[in-house]
């Protein structure tokens, strides 16, 4: 168990028009109008490179632990822009004694300006022996 | 700027789009979330839940859409959600909220819930920019 905050990685990410439209539709939006959904950055957190880094960090937790989302904060100083490139810097903290871990992200635009932050709280839920994925 | 949204102003209650199995699958396909708790009822039961869980981020996204659709809201600066009670796939949720504070930035802070009856499953706060 490790509780010290540590860098998870830095990732080049973009807002893809098709993904933004599909996410908006999946959230119930009708029609193509409207801003990029606020929760679009979670698509970046599900990217294979991020997941692999997380899995490597959590390897010691064993295969019989599943993450349950308990908290999410998203702050943006300006709406996300379709087609724009951003740099996402992620830091992992935990899991703590309660098996809660926190993933913090800072989003920068192509000029290096900070344009947003993310905080994801996850609880690791143990599965009984024999129920592992 | 926020005088049009005094403390106590209520966000009109909205029934969130039903997150049934089809809607959850559509969301998972887009989001890339492959957590088996959302896909596999047997895995969810093994973890102690009654059935597959609606992704918290699906509910948060729907709540953010409610704010975007509220004519009084011009933009969301930040939103914080706490997923306080697991939501089983197929559960109908209603979103409600009210302004709880003025922010020095000129925005207002809303407290929101999404839940069943008076029992919240998601508790949220958001700083929004009121529409002019």
Image (spheres, coloured by chain):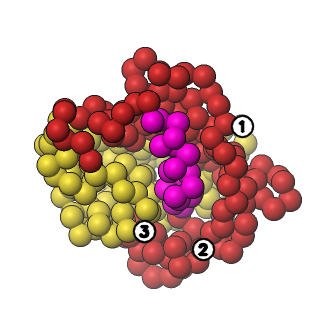
Disc 2 crowd, CA 10 A, few/some/many (<14, 14-19, 20+): some
Disc 2: which residue: A16
Chain coloured yellow here: B
Q: Which chain is red?
A: A
Q: Nearer the viewer, residue B72 or B53?
A: B53
Please report the residue visible at 41 percent of the width from the left and 74 percent of the height from the top.
A25
Residue under pointer 1: B104
Residue visible at 50% across and 82% down in the picture: A32
Q: Main secondary structure of the magenta part?
A: helix
- What percent of the width, then of the height, locates residue A10? 70, 49
Mark 1 belongs to which subunit? B
What element does badge 1 sit on? loop
Given residues B24 and B100, the one toward you in this image is B24
Q: Quadrant of the C terminus of chain B?
A: bottom right
Residue A117 in the figure: left or right of residue B116: right
Residue B30 image label:
3
* Same chain shared by disc 1 and disc 3: yes
Magenta segment range? Answer: A39-59
């Amino acid at each position: 168990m490790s509780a010290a905050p540590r860098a998870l990685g830095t990732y080049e990410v973009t807002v893809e028009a098709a993904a933004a439209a599909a996410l908006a539709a999946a959230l119930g939006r009708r029609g193509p109008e409207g801003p990029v959904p606020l929760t679009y950055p979670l698509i970046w957190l599900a990217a294979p490179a991020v997941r692999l880094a997380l899995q490597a960090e959590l390897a010691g937790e064993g295969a019989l632990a599943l993450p349950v989302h308990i908290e999410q904060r998203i702050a943006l100083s300006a709406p996300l822009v379709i087609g724009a490139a951003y740099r996402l810097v992620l830091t992992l903290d935990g899991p703590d004694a309660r098996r809660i871990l926190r993933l913090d992200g800072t989003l920068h635009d192509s000029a290096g300006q900070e344009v947003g932050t993310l905080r994801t709280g996850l609880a690791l839920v143990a599965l009984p022996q024999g129920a592992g994925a | 700027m926020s005088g049009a949204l005094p403390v106590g102003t209520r966000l009109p209650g909205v029934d969130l789009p039903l997150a049934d199995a089809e809607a959850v699958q559509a969301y998972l396909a887009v989001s890339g979330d492959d957590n088996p708790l959302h896909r596999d009822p047997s895995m969810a039961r093994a973890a102690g839940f009654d059935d597959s869980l609606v992704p918290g981020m699906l509910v948060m996204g729907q709540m953010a859409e409610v704010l975007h659709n509220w004519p009084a809201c011009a933009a969301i600066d930040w939103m914080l959600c706490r997923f306080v009670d697991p939501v089983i796939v197929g559960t109908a949720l209603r979103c409600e909220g009210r302004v709880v504070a003025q922010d020095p930035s000129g925005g207002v802070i809303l407290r929101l819930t999404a839940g069943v009856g008076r029992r919240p499953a998601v508790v949220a706060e958001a700083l929004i920019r009121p529409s002019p």
